[in-house]
Image: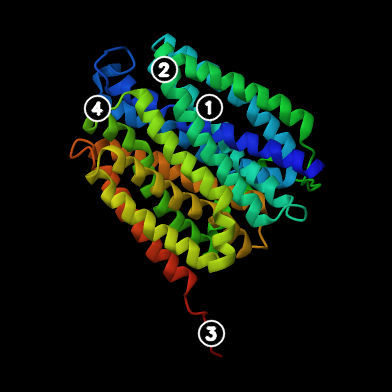
Amino acid sequence: MKAYWVFASVLLVTVLSTAGIALPYPILAPLFMGDQANELNQFMAISPELLLGFSLAIYPLGIFIGGSFIGALSDTYGRKKLLVYTLIISVLGYFLTAYAITSEDYLLFIFARLVTGLCEGNLSIARAIALDLAEKIDKTRAMSLIAAASFLGWLVGPLAGGYLAQYGAEVAFQVAGIAVLLCLFFVMLVITETHRVIQNQSFLFLLKSNNSLVLLKQPTILSIFIFQFIFCLGLNAFYEFYPVWLLVERGYESSMIGETTAIMTFSMMLASVLVVTKLKRFFGLLPTIITALICSALLLGILPLFSGTSMVVLFALTGVTIAIYNGLLPVYTSEVNRHVGNGALMGLLTVTFCIANAVMAIFGSLVLTISIAFPMYLGAILIGLSSLLVIKFAYRKPVVSVK
């Protein structure tokens, strides 16, 4: 029973961490590209598109930096200790973000988002704890529920951001800070240590050696990183810029963007809870992953052509395919790399998503000047390319040494 309480804490952390990523999406597009001028969207006469791009990129950049070592360090120092520290700093980051908005200080806003993102690398700790509990909770089931919690965060974040924005953009970040503070208390009371290794090396040595990016020296992990990075580029081209597309092309307000996102993420959550494990058992791990990737690419490619109810249905179906892939990839990564600590592996997956998020935030903001829908088409192409690389990697012929 204790293991399930620990797992419940992991799910709560996952919900709040992903909600923190998704929270600004319906807020930032109107804040930087709306009609109302302020010191944030007029900073140094930089175009609103670029200011929006930097604002979107800085948070995942922080997660990239933090995720590269937080999960790996938890393999040594312990999951709970690292989780508590990151939650404390995250609370401070959210309140600092709210203050930056009220004072219309763009540089402070960027700094606050960076600090908050740095600590949201604790997503890798949450995944690692779930894998540590594999003896009591089925690994595939645990990862499916983690994915469902992640999608719940994508549902709660945009909804909260969209509806709270009417009271002021800063209110959403204040509420997020309070929610993370409550999560911190719950973690301190409930979670027990699931993994800790006694060591005598210095912190700086461990920071350098226990870094998830060190894993890229291994060919198998490097191959997984490459196709996952390309997938994440495509996914973030969609995630980050469909709010702009809905705002400009479909005339949506913040609340309507939040509602559309909620429908998609609710579909993701249902798929994670009800479908992922069954599909894996029936069709197998790899065929399900590959099929989900191909379907995601096709759906993204046709989505900009639709409007109204049919568009919303396509959003929901896209969410289902993304949920299937995201629920199974951590399991596959862990299975083919059993000699590597789960904290480091999950940290690498977090890092991969976040660096792709940061890269696409900047690049996508530039191509918005070409076409508002172009980032979505680009996402379809990249996810399609990722599916081809997965097929090549998964069904490659083993190398036979000749003496």
What secondary structure is found at the residue carrying circle 2? Answer: helix
Relative to 133, 91 lies left or right: left
Residue 15 in view here: yes
Give the residue number, with chain letter if any, for mark 1.
115
Q: Position of residue 46 (x, y in %)?
A: 25, 23
Q: Which is nearer the N-term, disc 3 or disc 1?
A: 1
Q: Outermost residue, left direction?
A: 370
Q: Position of residue 373 (x, y in %)?
A: 24, 41
- Mark 4 or mark 2, which is nearer to you? 4
Which of the numbered marks, if any, corresponds to residue 400? Answer: 3
Q: Nearer the viewer, residue 315 or 105?
A: 315
Give the residue number, with chain letter if any, for mark 4.
251
Category of crowding for the residue at label 2, using alpha-carbon neighbours closer than 10 angstroms: few (below 14), some (14–19), many (at least 20): many
Q: Nearer the viewer, residue 263 or 192?
A: 263
Q: Which is nearer the N-term, disc 4 or disc 3?
A: 4
Which of the numbered marks, if any, corresponds to residue 165? Answer: 2
Q: Which is nearer the N-term, disc 4 or disc 2?
A: 2
Residue type at mark 4 is Gly
